[in-house]
Amino acid sequence: MFLGIDLTTKEQKPTACAILDEHGGLVSVTKLSTDDDMVALAEAHSPPIIAIDSPLGFPEGMDCLEEDHDCQSIHSFKGRVGERQLIAEGIGLYVTTKRSIIKPMIYRAIELAKRFEVLGFQVIEVYPFAAKVRLLGKPLPKKTTREGHNFLSKRLEGMIPGLKAYDGKLDHDHVDALFAAYTAWLHHHGRTDSMGSVNEVPIVVPGKPTQWPSASIPDEYDSNGANRNYKPGALQGIKVVDWTIWQFGPVA
């Protein structure tokens, strides 16, 4: 089992969680409110890897994100090494600094990761947007639009067996949790890159799609990767990646 968590800042907003089995198939996708609920979910399924969509550490030299504390990054740039590496790839993100707008979520994620690790679980930091870019290419439609959500959901259906049963029932947070869980599954099979330096928590992303096994084309897409039901709109101008090269395929 592999657990992906699209963590929120506060318990008042439920967190999307997804679990995949050893073959990458869907076990469950849900939303939970409290850290205790997420710990209980992990204890019930005993995943070898838990993937959290949030920074799980600070830039080297820092031990907090408080502006009135005297700890300082050793870097001449803002953020962490892994974040700068992703930016260099053209993958946008919010860098981790003392002025971060997601500071409460980072603190929550670090404490949650510690709880998992005390119980013996391996925890990795993931970034679903980077996973989407690595797996699907660019440009990508905005995930919060209907067209963008459909675009991502349909591609996930080709990657995760059993997901089609949830068609129309998932929101963009569920989708991010699924990309997190899929990254954990890939990591277990040695198909990821760990971005960053040895003294910072790495950001784990899917390996670059260079010679992956072929994948079948979903019914709604033709042999050129075009959606047969597509109508011009928000997706106009977006290039669809060839389905025959971007999916990993099953692991024996």
Image: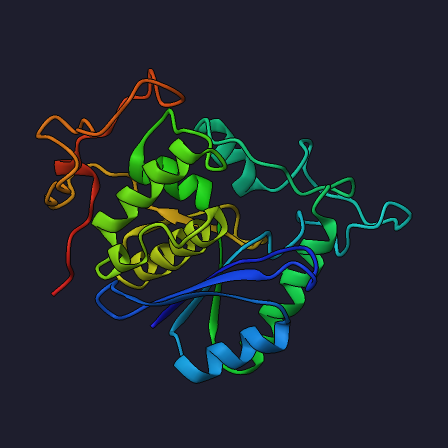
Is 46 above or below relative to 30? below
- Residue 54 x/y as whole percent: 58, 53
Viewer-proximal residue, 17 or 116? 17
Is 162 above or below relative to 151? below
Viewer-proximal residue, 170 or 101? 170
Residue 127 at least partly seen: no
Q: Is residue 212 left or right of residue 10?
A: left
Image quadrant holding the N terminus, namely bottom left
Q: How many marks?
A: 0
Viewer-proximal residue, 26 or 250? 26
Q: Is residue 137 left or right of residue 43?
A: left
Which residue is drawn at the image coordinates 45% and 56% (left, top)?
Answer: 177
Is 139 above or below relative to 5? above
Which residue is drawn at the image coordinates 50% and 37% (left, top)?
Answer: 144
Residue 184 at least partly seen: yes
- Residue 101 x/y as whole percent: 73, 41
Image quadrant holding the C terminus, namely bottom left
Which residue is drawn at the image coordinates 75% and 56% (left, top)?
Answer: 63
Q: How is the image coloured?
A: rainbow
Is 70 above or below relative to 229? below
- Residue 77 x/y as whole percent: 67, 31
- Residue 233 x/y as whole percent: 37, 19
Q: Is residue 3 left or right of residue 213?
A: right
Q: Is residue 184 left or right of residue 114?
A: left
Which residue is drawn at the image coordinates 36% and 23% (left, top)?
Answer: 235
Q: Quadrant of residue 186?
A: bottom left
